[in-house]
Amino acid sequence: MTTDESDAIEAFERLGLTSYEAKVFIALQQLGSGSAREIADVADVPRSQVYSVAESLEGRGLLEVQQSNPIRYRPVSVDEARETLRDRFENEQERAFEYVETVREETAGEEAQEDIWTIRDRDRVDDRVVDVLSRADDRIVFGTRLPELVTDEIERTLEERAAAGVEVTTISRSATVRDRFESLEDVRAYSPPRHRTENGDDRSGRIALVDDDTVLLSVVDDDGSETAIWSASSLFASVLIQLIEASTETPP
């Protein structure tokens, strides 16, 4: 068996076929049509297993049976097989997620969630920051020292919330970052207090405080990877926000 064929069989298995089903289907594509003996010779599947495997493939709509002596099998076209498997995958996906959504809705009122969540990976932190900021109703405090941690989507979200009447304050010890913040409509930009700048942590990433009940803090490792913790509508978030604000001079 070649590497390409092995990869194809594994791919078919991920689509729901068994190893034998994948081997028989591929063998039939090579043969065009064939008897159980011919399929077994090509597919490396025991002849005794070919009959049941073929019956299963017929049930899946992937081959046709010719009632001759001996019985012969013919695969559907590649396009038809692709469509059949795609439809089956989509149907199974719909069934699975419909159930998950139902369970989630039923237990939403009872679910006890952890107060603190951890996120790893820059893109995922980006998405969470945008999600947290977009939920603001009253105020936002957002800060970072690194220009690469201010994405276009974050800038758009800050402007959108400011336009909606949310008080948006941004903080950075980087003049480059402050300039970007200052270019945003109705967004205030400040430099942190001097003692915060002098004692700044070079691993600090981002901070987002939202509506006094949501907080996100991140750090950047030496390899550039980012890890964040966040919490919303929790006692932890409220207390942490109070501690952060108590240790930081509030911009005028």
Image: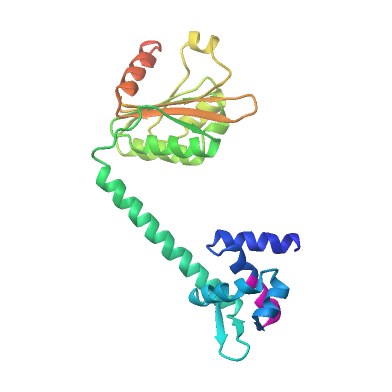
Residue farthest toward the bottom in the current orientation of the protein: 68
Residue farthest toward the right in the current orientation of the protein: 2
Rendering coords of residue 249 (x, y %): 39, 12
Query: Relative to 100, is 128 on the left or the right?
Result: right
Magenta residues, start to end: 24-33
Point 24% across, 37% down: residue: 110
Point 70% across, 68% down: residue: 44
Residue sitting nearer the eye, 186 or 70: 70
Q: Quadrant of residue 137?
A: top left
Residue 240 visible in image: yes
Residue sitting nearer the eye, 223 or 149: 223
Residue sitting nearer the eye, 46 or 2: 46
Residue farthest toward the left in the current orientation of the protein: 109
Q: Quadrant of the C terminus?
A: top left
Point 37% across, 28% down: residue: 231
Q: Is residue 238 above or below residue 90?
A: above
Q: Is residue 160 above or below residue 46?
A: above
Asked if residue 25 lies in the magenta stretch, the reply is yes
Colour theme: rainbow
Q: Quadrant of residue 224?
A: top right
Q: Quadrant of the N terminus?
A: bottom right
Rendering coords of residue 105 (x, y %): 27, 47
Asked if residue 145 lies in the magenta stretch, the reply is no
Point 57% across, 33% down: residue: 148
Rendering coords of residue 141 (x, y %): 39, 25
Residue sitting nearer the eye, 157 or 121: 121
Rendering coords of residue 159 (x, y %): 40, 38
Q: Is residue 51 above or below residue 2?
A: below
